[in-house]
Image (tube, rainbow, N blue to C red):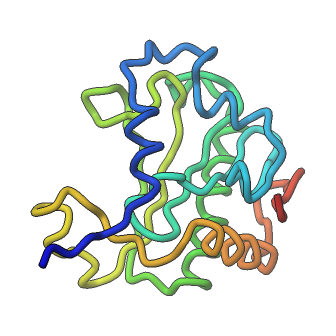
Amino acid sequence: MTERLWAGWRMAYLRGASESAGGAGDCLFCSLAGQDPSSRTLVLERYRHAFLVLNAFPYTTGHLMVAPYRHAEDLLSESMEARAEILAALERARVALAREYGPDGFNLGANLGRAAGAGVIGHLHWHLVPRWLGDTNFMPAVAGVRVIPEALPDTYARLLAALANTVPEGVTVEGRGGDA
């Protein structure tokens, strides 16, 4: 008997995959920058220069991203104030993830250019991915599938609550998410 693993989010990802030129007009992050924080947009918080968003196609539960509002592919094109805020937002998110999920470590990085794995070309953004000892398994290698053990709305609610209990050092929270 063949078993089935439901990964309902994959079809939206597959339909949205394209060879985009990476202009601001078709940029995911430029679109999200204009959206209110909500469980519908997955934007958790907005700051002066950047925002925190849950990845809709996560590598693992709690996969977050921080993106500046400006459509630029280069960190040095941001002001010192914006760079400091982005780092503070990443640390704020890390503390909230650590408190809520207790991972054993984190991957933190940015993919610069298509060859480096960037899915959104031209708009610099950072990924913060919680990791647990033993969280690797055969599914990605054998089936091309990642197993995500929690639904996005549940992750969003948990992270929003964890962020509410995290001191916003280095960032001014200008907008917080809630129910859609």
At horizontal 84% and vertical 64% (from top left) the residue drawn is: 178
At horizontal 47% and vertical 70% (from top left) the residue drawn is: 61
x, y percent for residue 140? 20, 62
From this view, report whether residue 68 is shown above or below residue 40.
Answer: above
Quarter of the figure that contains the C terminus: bottom right
**Horizontal arrangement in the rendering, residue 61 relative to residue 179 (left or right):** left
In front of the other: 12 or 41: 12
- Quarter occupied by residue 136: bottom left
- Quarter occupied by residue 67: top right
**Horizontal arrangement in the rendering, residue 15 relative to residue 38 (left or right):** left
In front of the other: 114 or 167: 114
x, y percent for residue 28? 59, 32
Question: Quick check: can you spot residue 107?
Answer: no
In front of the other: 92 or 155: 155
Quarter of the figure that contains the N terminus: bottom left
Q: In the displayed orientation, state which residue is furthest to the front.
A: 1
Question: Quick check: can you spot residue 15?
Answer: yes
At horizontal 50% and vertical 46% (from top left) the residue drawn is: 126
**Horizontal arrangement in the rendering, residue 121 relative to residue 144 (left or right):** right
Number of marks: 0
x, y percent for residue 39? 74, 59
At horizontal 58% and vertical 66% (from top left) the residue drawn is: 152
x, y percent for residue 9? 46, 54
